[in-house]
Image: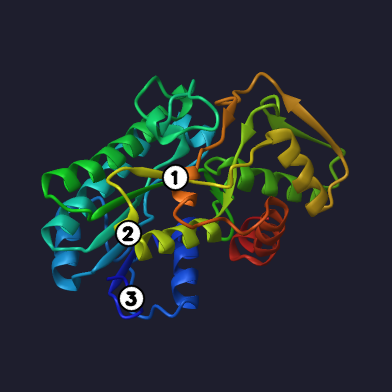
Amino acid sequence: MFSKTSKIFVAGHRGLLGSAIMRRLESDGYGNIITRGRDELDLTDAASVDAFFKAERPEFVFLAAGRTGGIIANIAYPSSFLHENISIQDNIFEAAERHGVERLIFYGSSCMYPKSSPQPIPEDSLLTGPVEKTSEPYAVAKIAGVVACRSYNNQYKSRRFISLVPNSIYGQNDNFNLESSHVMAGLIRRFHEAKAEGASEIRLWGTGRPRREFLYADDAASASVFAMLNADMLENTHYNIGTGEDHSIADIASIIARIVGYDGVIVWNASKPDGALRKVLDSGRFSSIGWKPLVSLHDGIRTTYEWFLTSEYAKAHI
């Protein structure tokens, strides 16, 4: 039973989602949390991961570690996205099963669904068609993780592994490196720099027409804790988690420009790839259990930008 005294391992605790999970657990009074940085535990090394689980015996695991990035990073480092994520997943799954973890949450990605999926995307669209080519290696790794969760549960007659599929997450501790960031963080940095430099115009990738659903990291964390607390109500399948609302990238850019205070011209470079034209998840199955997001898009972007302005990352790079 997931309780305030449970021994909890948050893998990837310094990242976007992991840090949000840490904030949620700590604010809710969960005090027995263990973490390891990359310099302490290499999650791609099977022997090290097994030794860690054998020594620490975590009861509950949030698997928020892994390599992530936007279109540029996916195009530049496809084998790294595939290898690192599959290695981390496989090592932690095996160790969790071997050493008796009660529940583990794995996070899929909306990019694992076929690019021709109906919108909003239902869970049963998985593996019904080809995925977007620009994110194929990452998508394949995430598909493997979702299938692995179901397979372990089936083989060992348990409900140990839970799969949640959030849409595009953003928030505090996001990656603002322009070569590897997702669209939200990348846009926030670009507009901040344009304002700071007094640029009269800003040129952005694509047409601005693709539509995306964004989930604030703290809402993803609340869904994660909710899933642990209500694990007995979940079936052996994956669950979408999102807001159910999508916006064009052009609209997102306009919102960010207003929050940042940039009043220059936005120019779209249509020669650059857009990615999938629309991605919004059907989160009805998970929401029907009782969870719902609380942070509006405007409030989430504003809070993210406020964090960005005070972050060590901004001080070091801007």
Tag 3: amino acid = Ser
Question: Judging from the image, what secondary structure is the residue with disc 3 in?
Answer: loop
Residue that carries the numbered disc 1 in the rendered image:
285
> Label 1: how many residues lie within 10 Å, few (<14), some (14-19) or many (20+)?
some
Q: Residue at x 74, y 34 (%)?
A: 250
Residue that carries the numbered disc 3 in the rendered image:
3
Query: Is residue 82 shown to the viewer in this render?
Result: yes
Instruction: Give the quadrant of residue 84.
Output: top left
Q: How many marks?
A: 3
Residue nearer the viewer, 292 or 276? 292
- Asked if residue 104 is positioned above or below residue 206 in the image, the reply reads below
Q: Quadrant of the C terminus?
A: bottom right
Tag 1: amino acid = Arg
Q: Residue at x 65, y 64 (%)?
A: 307
> Rounded to the nearest whole Å, what is the CA distance between mark 2 and mark 1?
14 Å
> Label 2: how many residues lie within 10 Å, few (<14), some (14-19) or many (20+)?
some
Residue nearer the viewer, 207 or 229? 229
Tag 2: amino acid = Ala
Query: Is residue 166 shown to the viewer in this render?
Result: no
Q: Earlier in the sequence, mark 1 or mark 3?
A: 3
